[in-house]
Image (cartoon, grey):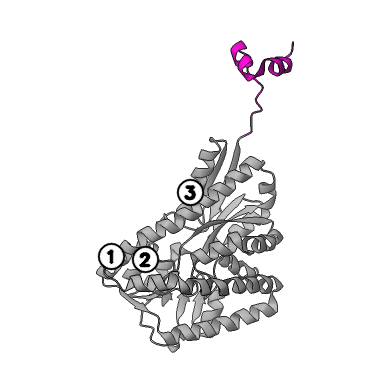
Amino acid sequence: MDRRSIIKQAGIAGVLAAGVAPAVHAQAAIRWRLASSFPKSLDTIYGGAEVFSKAVKAMSGGKFEISVHAGGELMPPFGVVDGVQQGTVEMAHTVPYYFYGKNPAFALGSAVPFGFNARQMNAWMLHGNGRKLMNEFYAGFNMVSFAGGNTGTQMGGWFRKEIKSPDDFKGMKMRLGGGLIGEVMQKLGAVPQSIPGGEIYQALEKGTLDAAEWVGPYDDQKLGFNKVAPFYYYPGWWEGGPEVDFFINQKAFDGLSAENKAIIEAATNVAHIDMLAKYDALNPTALKQLVAAKTKVLPFSQAVMDASFKASMEVFAANDAKSPEWKKIYADMRAFQRDQVLWFRFAEARYDSFMSSQKL
């Protein structure tokens, strides 16, 4: 009697009692590489990829391992999309708006000026058309995307001088996170600079930059910006809820089993939720420490906000005319946002406004 006959007639209990082990198909171990756009010193945003990698290994019982490499280790921080598209690495962890120069539609996958907050972004991506539309776009770059974190609304950056009116931006050399906000700030007279996070401090210290934005108190304090620029403005109106993404080479992803695809999706969700929670937990203490160290924390004036909104809308209209991908996704995003703003006005915004005025 062969092995299959034994199993069929005796069942699993009989097989085990007889000491006959059923055939098991061993699954080959998978080893991928992930290129990050961030330096290791930023345990929050870089750490999102490590949270993801550990989750994949744990859920696969060690059969699926993804090594994480900091920006510049395998390729330049802003070269990771090329790396994924060409198959040099299987994955990247980055902010889509870094690649605005390839096509303006990239920015819509993370943040645009006066766009979603973090919760609204999640709603659009998960229960609106966001992920579907972005992945249709990314398919042209041989990639598929998954959410990989969010910072929440960011700060407006560090400045060597006070910003009292829109005119104060004229001639200012400012590090900005992506080409889209750079185009907006150019309309206000600034001279945008694109510099990876690990190089900002030296540029501010040497005077190569007059101002710089990164994320918020926790990361900014770690990078030491308060030591070289005393004025810290808020809010970061160009990043109301910027999503960080995992990009995966389409061929590599298609080659995974259904089980491993599910593991990838589950692990990205773990990393996505963890990052925002970590920022929300760590930013308050860092902000208090920055204030104690004599940082001047100031709001952008209404005039600055109004001028910035007007300039943003002009750039968006120009993008509608030059990128059909942008036009299609942007229209869907704004339609969804209108309802989100309406809803938040009645509940979240009113509640937050009241609580911010109370003494607990």
| Disc 2 secondary structure class | helix
**Which numbered disc, 1 or 3, marks the residue that appears first in the sequence?**
3
The residue that appears at 71% across and 73% down in the rendered structure is 324
State left or right for residue 346 relative to residue 90.
left
The image shows a total of numbered marks equal to 3
Note whether 70 is above or below 200 in the view shown: above
Is residue 18 something one can see in this rendering?
A: yes
Note whether 125 is above or below 16 in the view shown: below
* Residue 151 drawn in magenta: no
Residue position for label 3: 50
Which is more toward the observer, 120 or 70? 120
State left or right for residue 154 relative to residue 290.
right
Q: Quadrant of the N terminus?
A: top right
Amino acid carrying label 3: it is Glu
CA–CA distance in space, label 1 to label 3:
27 Å
Residue sitting farthest toward the front: 346
Q: Which mark is residue 217?
A: 2
| Disc 3 secondary structure class | helix
Residue position for label 1: 289
Q: Quadrant of residue 231?
A: bottom left
